[in-house]
């Protein structure tokens, strides 16, 4: 059972790894053109950006970004199925995901099954292809299996399934959207705390990626604040640990101070993995410290209304972030909290006589 | 021992390369001959040739996602591990080979 789950996680991550550049490209192009529209008051009577008067380049950037986003569910589902069933998985996965991207009318809104639909249909497509592959075929029919039977049969089955699933999943997506928009005060804080903790907990591992991918998927749904909270939390573990080696020179070895500098560099470009060398050496003190710092950063960013249209974190995304001052404040607070807590924990350990706990996180 | 390895993490910008480095460093320390292919965000780098693979005693697949061109490894003994395992405790990975 555990192995089956492990395998499915691998399939999902295969899809995610292929779709991240699409979100980056679409998110940043759209954000830049929308920023331009607001800056030069190109808005319609509802206050939404209006590109009819915008320069050709700005209008085109918007259009290109939107196209990259429209491909998102297709690519995600396509490569989930590819990870699972190899080349024959691509057709049903892409077509199923493409259907999931078609907007549905739910009440007074347009919504598509989007990323959730794509995740589900990608897995279904992989299973369908693998099942069809197992059907015993006489030798003379074998050549037509991969070019005729497999693509048509699998895509027909997967396509029909997705057409049936479209509406129910779109309804869930609209519900999720309502839920996130209506979240106020305490529940917003709770979500940010959870995201921050997940981001720091395994420093770029699967738990971190789950939170990161939730934020990325919400970008495609037009909600940038989830990623805003993640973006602040992503960079504070390496930044905080690097800061700790700078302010507490005596309690860190020369070697650790050197990796502290490297961690600062990685933090600036939003790579949580920079914290790993510290966490591997002393998991029971480092991990709680970075989890605490990232939670602080995520909550500050969430309450400050920080929006990040790029699926990446750290000071490097500052140019595209909204509410920049709050973003910087969130990162600074998180880093300081991490630095102070790890230094206090370390000092206490050194003054007591008990040996440091050993082991892996 | 001659070893080939593939590393790949979902984002493909940090873990993939850190794991490759760990495997190379540890192999050198233990006196093994190793070539590591990375399948990161830039695509396949330091690609393993068919000769590399057929000449290897074992292939280490340190991946959290599906390996590109997995069929290349059909005829060699494989060890599948998560990327984290290569990062955190590379020596244990090599110990696993000796037992296998």
Image (cartoon, coloured by chain):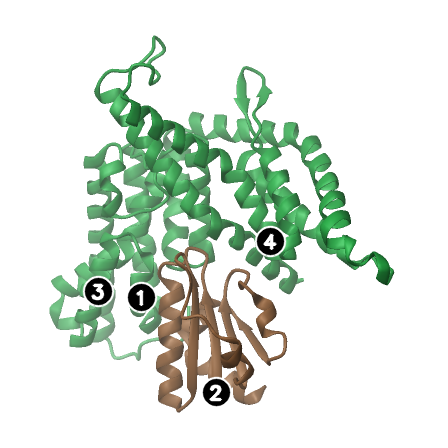
Q: Are marks 2 and 1 on the same chain?
A: no
Instruction: Identify the subunit bearing mark 1.
Output: A
Q: What x and y, as percent, mark residue B65?
A: 52, 60
* Residue under label 4: A82
Mark 2, other Cα within 10 Å: few <14 / some 14–19 / many ≥20: some
x and y percentages locating residue A248 in the rendered image: 14, 65
User: Disc 2 versus disc 1: distance between alpha carbons?
Assistant: 38 Å
Looking at the image, residue A184 lies above or below residue A156: above
Q: Is residue A85 above or below residue B50?
A: above
Q: Colour of chain A?
A: green
Q: Which residue sits at x=34%, y=55%?
A: A291
Residue B66 in view here: yes
> Do the residues at pointers 2 and 4 share their chain?
no
Write down the quadrant of residue B47 in the picture: bottom left
Q: Tell me which numbered mark, 3 or 1, is placed earlier along the sequence.
A: 3
- Is B23 situated above or below A5? below
- Colour assigned to chain B in the rendering is brown
- For marks 4 and 1, the one nearer the N-term is 4
Q: Quadrant of the C terminus of chain A?
A: bottom left
Q: Position of residue B71 (x, y in %)?
A: 61, 69
> Which of labels 3 and 2 is toward the front?
2
> What's the mark number on residue B2?
2
**Which residue position is annotated with label 1?**
A285
Within 10 Å of disc 3 (Cα), the crowding (few <14, some 14-19, many 20+) is: some
């Amino acid at each position: 059972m555990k192995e089956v789950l492990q395998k499915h996680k691998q399939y999902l991550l295969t899809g995610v790894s292929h779709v991240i550049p699409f979100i980056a490209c679409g998110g940043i192009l759209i954000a830049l053109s929308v920023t331009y529209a607001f800056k030069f008051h190109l808005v319609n009577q509802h206050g939404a950006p209006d590109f009819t008067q915008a320069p050709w380049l700005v209008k085109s950037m918007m259009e290109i970004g939107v196209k990259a986003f429209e491909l998102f569910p297709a690519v995600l589902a396509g490569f989930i199925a590819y990870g699972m069933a190899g080349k024959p998985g691509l057709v049903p996965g892409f077509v199923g995901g493409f259907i999931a991207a078609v907007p549905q009318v739910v009440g007074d809104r347009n919504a598509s099954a989007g990323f959730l639909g794509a995740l589900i249909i990608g897995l279904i497509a992989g299973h369908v292809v693998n099942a069809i592959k197992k059907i015993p075929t006489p030798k003379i029919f074998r050549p037509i299996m991969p070019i005729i039977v497999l693509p048509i049969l699998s895509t027909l089955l997967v396509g029909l399934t997705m057409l049936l699933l479209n509406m129910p999943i779109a309804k869930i997506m609209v519900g999720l959207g309502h839920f996130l928009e209506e979240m106020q005060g305490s529940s917003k804080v709770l979500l940010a705390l959870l995201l921050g903790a997940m981001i720091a907990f395994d420093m770029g591992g699967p738990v971190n990626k789950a939170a990161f991918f939730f934020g990325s998927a919400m970008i495609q749904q037009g909600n940038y604040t989830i990623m805003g909270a993640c973006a602040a939390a992503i960079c504070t573990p390496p930044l905080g640990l690097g800061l700790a080696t700078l302010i507490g020179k005596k309690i860190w070895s020369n070697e650790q101070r050197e990796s502290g500098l490297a961690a600062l560099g990685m933090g600036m470009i939003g790579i949580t993995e920079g914290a790993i060398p510290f966490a591997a050496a002393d998991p029971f003190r480092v991990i709680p410290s970075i989890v605490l710092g990232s939670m602080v950063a995520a909550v500050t960013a969430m309450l400050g209304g920080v929006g990040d249209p790029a699926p990446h974190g750290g000071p490097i995304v500052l140019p595209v972030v909204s509410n920049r001052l709050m973003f910087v404040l969130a990162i600074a607070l998180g880093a300081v909290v991490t630095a102070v807590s790890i230094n206090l924990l370390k000092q206490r350990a050194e003054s007591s006589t008990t040996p440091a706990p050993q082991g892996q996180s | 021992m001659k070893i080939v390895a593939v590393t790949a993490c979902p984002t493909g910008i940090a873990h993939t390369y850190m794991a490759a480095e760990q495997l190379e460093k540890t192999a050198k320390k233990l006196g093994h001959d190793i070539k590591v292919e990375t399948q990161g965000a830039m695509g396949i780098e330091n690609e393993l040739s068919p000769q590399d693979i057929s000449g290897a005693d074992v292939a280490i697949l340190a991946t959290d996602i599906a390996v590109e061109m997995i069929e290349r490894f059909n005829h060699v003994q494989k060890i599948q591990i998560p990327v984290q395992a290569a990062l955190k405790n590379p020596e244990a990975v090599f110990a696993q080979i000796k037992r296998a």
